[in-house]
Image (cartoon, grey):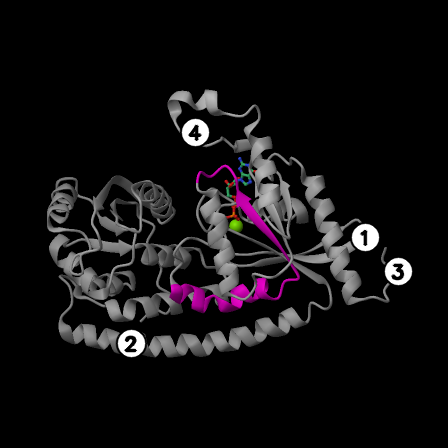
Amino acid sequence: MAEHIETTAVPETGVLVGLVTRSQTEEAVKDYLDELAFLALTAGITTEKSFIQKLDSPDPKTFIGKGKTEEVKAYVEENEIDVIIFDDDLSPSQLRNLEKIFNKKIYDRSLLILDIFLLRARTAQAKTQVELARSEYLLPRLTRMWTHLERQRGGTGTRGGAGEKEIETDRRIIRDKISRLKERLKQIDKQMHTQRGNRGSLVRVALVGYTNAGKSTLMNLLSKSNVFAEDKLFATLDTTVRKVVLQNLPFLLTDTVGFIRKLPHQLVESFKSTLDEVREADLLLHVVDISHPNFEEHYHTVNTTLDEIDSGDKPVIVVFNKVDAYRPKAKDPQDAEADQPADPLEELKTTWMSKVEAADVVFISALKKQNIDELRDKMYRQIKQIHVERYPHDHFLY
Ligand code: GDP
Ligand code: MG
């Protein structure tokens, strides 16, 4: 079996399914589905329609109710849709039942994210991490359809789905693969640790933030390097480290993978060593895309993830990016103008300056290079302070 499965980039069509429950409002679900459509597009799937259902809680057998299931089935058959994508995670049995009903490829958010990571991984470490996460996700979910698809991807196509015996064989193959990948990851981690150790005593600064916030753009600007940046989710997967000098102060700047709502926990697990870059940083630049209507939720998602990897207490500069594209959220489109303050961005600045405790806050545009000097200034002051605390006798640098 091929070790690295290539995801085919053939364009596909899809529909999205979201659930409004007691814990998820309709407005939130619409935003989540927008993000899901963006994720789908990143994976090469064009969204043709979204289905939203209101239920107190998900149906344990089919996630959505019977009527909605029939509505979706009619639509996907009529329009020859390839994939049905659920915003929430499906249990293995829900996945099996839905596959039986629709006889189509079913994705949930986790699997979509895993597939994107698989497409985008470049280094041996990233590839191994994603393969491991994906294998662990798939193991309990191996169904006739999945086994069939995996064989197609692996280039050993069997027609018409696989039997129980083949599924059992595939389970064994995947289990072996998981232990081999874990072993390999251990080796790579050791090498990476040594590499990081060799970087010496320079202060380390890490760019963190929600995916697509502008981290790589800022990395390029600050380090004059050429990191891949584009308007897709997870454009960069591998961390990049560059030595940067501000005035006379050298430090290491790391670009990291973006965080996202509901990052599959297998992925967080297997990305531990990538996240080590964050964990070992002395200072974080938390980049926030202020032009995104959900930026506050993004900000909190990132902080929660930072807490999860014990990095919530690090010194941080909150960098509100994309001020050039900022449009205030109108509460009511009818009287939006009447309610707007004279300068919505200025008002937003004052609220956030006082909201973010114990952190420097700066508003910039990485793309239009606005206010970058203020950011550099804040970075310089914090890095210098860290340096002085670490090397109290080193007077020569300043
Ligand atoms: P990352 O996922 O956080 O690394 O984000 P990228 O740096 O790849 O940027 C994502 C998208 O946002 C790209 O299309 C960038 O050109 C765009 N972008 C980055 N900074 C700005 C900005 O200040 N203003 C605007 N309008 N777009 C930006
Ligand atoms: Mg990036």
SS state under label 4: loop
Q: Which residue bears the numbered disc 3?
A: 396
The mark that comes first in sequence, 2 or 4, is: 2
SS state under label 2: helix
In the rendered image, residue 126, in percent from the top left (x then y), is placed at 47, 64
Q: CA distance from mark 1 to mark 2?
A: 55 Å
The mark that comes first in sequence, 1 or 2, is: 2
Report whether residue 80 is seen: yes
The mark that comes first in sequence, 1 or 3, is: 1
In magenta stretch: residue 270: yes
**Residue 248 marker:** 1
Neighbours of disc 3 within 10 Å: few (<14), some (14-19), many (20+): few
Circle 3: residue type: Phe
Q: CA distance from mark 3 to mark 4?
A: 53 Å
Q: CA distance from mark 1 to mark 3?
A: 10 Å
Q: Which residue bears the numbered disc 2?
A: 173
SS state under label 1: loop
In the rendered image, residue 83, in percent from the top left (x then y), is placed at 23, 49
Q: Which residue bears the numbered disc 4?
A: 330
Q: CA distance from mark 4 to mark 1?
A: 45 Å
Q: Are marks 1 and 2 in contact (CB under 8 Å)?
A: no
* In the displayed structure image, the side of residue 46 where residue 348 appears, left or right: right
Circle 1: residue type: Asn
Q: Which residues are magenta?
A: 265-293
The residue lying at 69 percent from left, 67 percent from top is 199
Circle 2: residue type: Ile
